[in-house]
Image (spheres, rainbow, N blue to C red):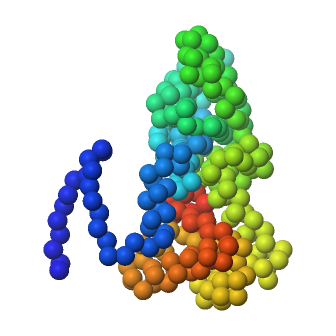
Amino acid sequence: MGAYHTIELELNRKFTLAKKCWDSVVLDRIEQACDPVQRADVAAVVMQEGLANVVLVTPAMTLLRAKVEVTIPRKRKGSCSQHEKALERFYEAVMQAILRHINFEVVKCILVASPGFVKDQFFTYVFKEAVRQDNKVLLENRPKFMLVHSSSGHKYSLKEILCDPAVTSRLSDTKAAGEVKALEDFYKMLQHEPDRAFYGIAHVEKAADALAIDTLMISDKLFRHQDIQTRSRYVRLVDNVRDNGGNVRIFSSLHVSGERKL
């Protein structure tokens, strides 16, 4: 009709959403969104001197919750006091961001990643302060912290962190690791057994018709396509694979694995 109407949805306000056709993909998404178990069970602090990104990793997306930036003066000959004071301010700000944005009741693992020894110095600072302040939340959750190497403190380093074998082993019971592992398995198969890995809608549909798909990986971006016929085509593909006993992994374009796939 070319007309628009705006309605404001607030937390805990009930509303009814009507739609002529509810496909299986949409219904799955609603069910996942309403299930509290699906919330972020992995957190990561990706850092370098003066920069830290506090990130939550859910099965559907990677959420940047806080970015901490502090100018760190260089060490001067004979005096490091300014450098050390700035580092302490930086570590304190990152620690407060962790306490503010990470729900320790839900999160099973907190990855602290950096180049060099920044992560180790930060870890030492956090638990020295936790003992001094008698911060029970941090002290009780100390086993959840895992120190890993990253090439930088930028968010994109999260990809390499989640692919680290030591990390995937630790995160084996979390949902996010499954998404990343599936993508890594696909790339390995493409490299070593290219006849078993298919991509592109036409080839994948033929494989589905031949009941030859064990795992289908697809981006949720395709279900938001402007053309309804195109959207329906991808939904039919998903239903076909599921009906024939295959696994379907829907990658979000907001998730670190989905970003790589796209």
The quadrant the C terminus occupies is bottom right
Instruction: Tell me where residue 181 appears, x and y as whole percent.
Output: 71, 59
- Residue closest to the eye, 135 or 82: 135
Query: Is 71 situated left or right of 131 in this image?
Result: left
In this view of the protein, can residue 45 be seen by the observer? Answer: no
Q: Which residue is drawn at 43% across and 59% down?
A: 30
Question: Residue 209's spot in the image, x, y percent?
Answer: 65, 88
- Label tally: 0
Q: Is residue 255 positioned above or below 215 on the image?
A: above
Can I make out residue 236 in this image? yes
- Give the percent coordinates (x, y) of residue 119: 67, 33
Q: Residue at x 78, y 72 (%)?
A: 189
Specify whether 29 is left or right of 257: left
Of residues 8 and 66, the one nearer the viewer is: 8
Q: Is residue 44 above or below residue 225?
A: above
**Looking at the image, which residue is at 39% across and 82% down?**
228
Q: Observer-nearest residue: 23 or 175?
A: 23
Task: From the viewer's perspective, tell me whether residue 143 is left or right of residue 47.
Answer: right
Image quadrant occupied by the N terminus? bottom left
The residue lying at 66 percent from left, 25 percent from top is: 142
Classify residue 109 by image quadrant.
top right
| Whether residue 207 is situated above or below residue 79 in the rendered picture | below
- Give residue 146's position: percent from left, percent from top: 70, 35
The quarter holding residue 80 reads: top right
